[in-house]
Image: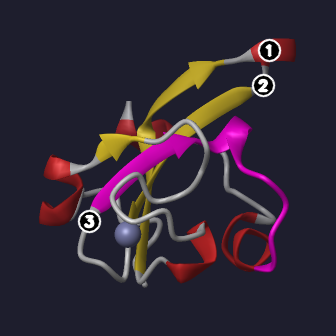
Amino acid sequence: MDAFNPLPPAWVEHAIHSLSFHCPHCGAAVTQAQKVWLNRRAPVLGTNHRRKFQEFYECECGGAWWAWSSDRPPSELAEQYFSDPPEADSELD
Ligand SMILES: [Zn+2]
């Protein structure tokens, strides 16, 4: 998975915002996602001045959705991919 590829994959274009960190299309958990992409180009300052990012997921049902990284519940999948998110690259600015 190219979670940290700076270029957004095509499937993120039809992603819808999920407030529950579940697929809004079928209700599957984030752990059922087949693909993930992290929008590192547009960090937003959240609470405690910690940056949060849009995390895009493509579900096994074919639906795409996104949620803020700050809203992500602890999960093994997230730990695997995002346990050490790199700082935003200065060359992207
Ligand atoms: Zn789904």
Task: Give the SS element for disc 1.
Answer: helix
Query: Mark 1: which amino acid?
Result: Thr
Residue drawn at (26%, 49%) of the image: 15
Disc 3 under 8 Å from ligand 1? The reply is: yes
The count of marks equals 3
The residue where tag 2 is placed is 50
Question: Residue 13: image x %, image y %?
Answer: 15, 49
Q: Nearer the viewer, residue 35 or 42?
A: 35
24 to the left or right of 84: left
User: Tags 2 and 1 in contact by the CB under 8 Å rule?
Assistant: yes
Q: Mark 2 or 1, which is nearer the eye?
A: 1
Image quarter where the C terminus lies is: top left
- CA distance for labels 3 and 1: 29 Å
Q: Quadrant of residue 41?
A: top left
Q: Quadrant of residue 16?
A: top left
Q: Is residue 73 magenta?
A: yes
Disc 1 under 8 Å from ligand 1? The reply is: no
Image quarter where the N terminus lies is: bottom left
Question: Residue 83: image x %, image y %?
Answer: 80, 65
Residue drawn at (70%, 39%) of the image: 71
The 10 Å Cα crowd at callout 1, few under 14, some 14 to 19, many 20 or more, is few
The residue where tag 3 is placed is 63
Question: Residue 45: image x %, image y %?
Answer: 65, 16
The residue where tag 1 is placed is 47
Q: Which residues are magenta?
A: 64-76
Query: Mark 2: which amino acid?
Result: Arg
The 10 Å Cα crowd at callout 3, few under 14, some 14 to 19, many 20 or more, is some
62 to the left or right of 28: left
Q: Is residue 90 magenta?
A: no
- CA distance for labels 2 and 1: 6 Å
Q: Mark 3 or 1, which is nearer the eye?
A: 3
